[in-house]
Image (spheres, grey):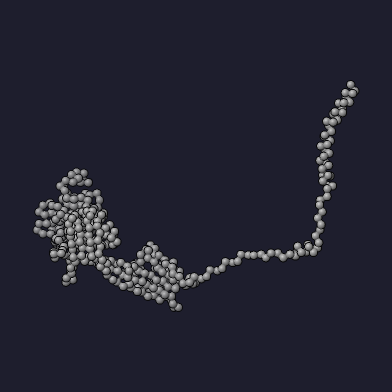
Amino acid sequence: MNRLLAWGEYVSGLVRAPRLYFAVVPLAIPLLFATIDPPRVAPRSTEAAAAVVLAPLPPVVFDAPAPMPAPLPEHPVFIPVEHGDTLDSIFRRGGLTAAESYALVQEFTRSIDPRRLRPGDFVRFLYDGGDEVQSVAMKVTGWGEVRARRLAEGFHVSAAEAPESTREIVVSASIDSSLYEAIRGAGEEPQLVQRLVDVFQWDVDFFRLQDGDSFSMVVEKKYSGSDLVGYGPILAARFVHDGREFEAFRFESGGRAGYYTRNGTPVRKQFLKAPLKFTRITSGFTKRRFHPVLKKMRPHYGVDYGAPSGTPVMSTADGVVVYAGFDRGEGKHIRIKHNSRTETWYLQCMGSRVPTALYRRRPQTSRARPAAQIDVSSTFPGPSFCSTCQRDSPGPGDNRV
């Protein structure tokens, strides 16, 4: 029994021994490393240390400053004319002082009308190397040019009108959609449309043009320098409408000019084809038409034209005004008697140039002078004009007389 107890104490001692080892090892490791000397490095000599200290540093390189841009030589600047601009605002925007701008405005207005300037025109400013304005040039389309040059005592202004010239050209085109589009497609301006209509207004109903109609004409174009300023009279013209060919040649005698056919017959007839310059037909002559306001079928002894309020209405022939007044159905209207059998009525007018109080004086009227203006003054839903011709009894509209 005693022997067994002795063996048990011996074994338990072996088990507890590692605890002593783990407690001693952390204390022994620092002592172990402390006894190891680090490798010794031989100290540098004083001369070597001094050489290291006194060695020259590399030079510091800074970015070189950017060179100053060279002053600009004389250079022009074009400033566009914008909507709402004045001469003063343009000059101030170009770099002139208030005093210089005021002086130039006074000088420029002595030579040109500033209202001739249009948005899109340009004013040219010439600057020297110091960005000071040396000259100002303004081109006025259709007139010429005005220049201002800086002198020691101020600006000197000079004006030069462009030379005027006239050229005869030939314009030809085929009508696909409208006369306006045909002339614009030929490279000409819209004002040429009305000139051509005025020549053939007695023979051609321009409200009933057809695809395939064509025209050609010799016309004068007026230039101021290189700018087109307008058109002169049409010298000769041919119009093909609905398979029929019409010709007109301008002839002037005794200060009066007119158009004649190849045989010498005047192109001008007694009646115009239409009392309006250029618009559209909305309703023709018929004995049975659905009225847009009354909502029932009624005869319509005339031709309706759709046009804006205020459109001038022409008398279709020379005559005498026999009535100018108001009627509930026709609105404000005028009646003109041309001969013993023929009378034309102009309905739905306003601003009649022949007031009701004056028609008893039997004033004369002619095709060259507007007789009235279009108004909304009758049983019709919008601005329109109705023209009718009475020949002994209700008859067709003017375009069929």
Which part of the image, by quadrant, shows the C terminus? bottom left
Res. 324 visible in picture? no
Q: Residue at x 30, y 67 (%)?
A: 229
Percent of width and height locating residue 363: 15, 62
Q: Residue at x 76, y 64 (%)?
A: 51
The extreme bottom residue here reads: 152
The picture places residue 228, in percent across and down from the top left corner, at 30, 66
Q: Is residue 57 left or right of residue 354?
A: right
Q: Nearer the viewer, residue 97 or 176?
A: 176
What residue sits 79% from the left and 64% below the top?
47
Q: Residue furthest top?
A: 1
Disc tally is: 0
On the picture, is 163 further left or further right than 133?
left
User: Residue 111 versus residue 401: which sits nearer the camera?
Assistant: 401
Residue at horizontal 23 percent and vertical 55 percent from the top: 212
Res 241 quadrant in image = bottom left
**Does 138 appear above or below 367?**
below
Q: Give x and y (percent) for residue 197.
A: 22, 60
Q: Residue furthest right?
A: 2
Say whether residue 44 is visible.
yes
Question: Splitting the image into 4 quarters, where does residue 271 fall?
Answer: bottom left
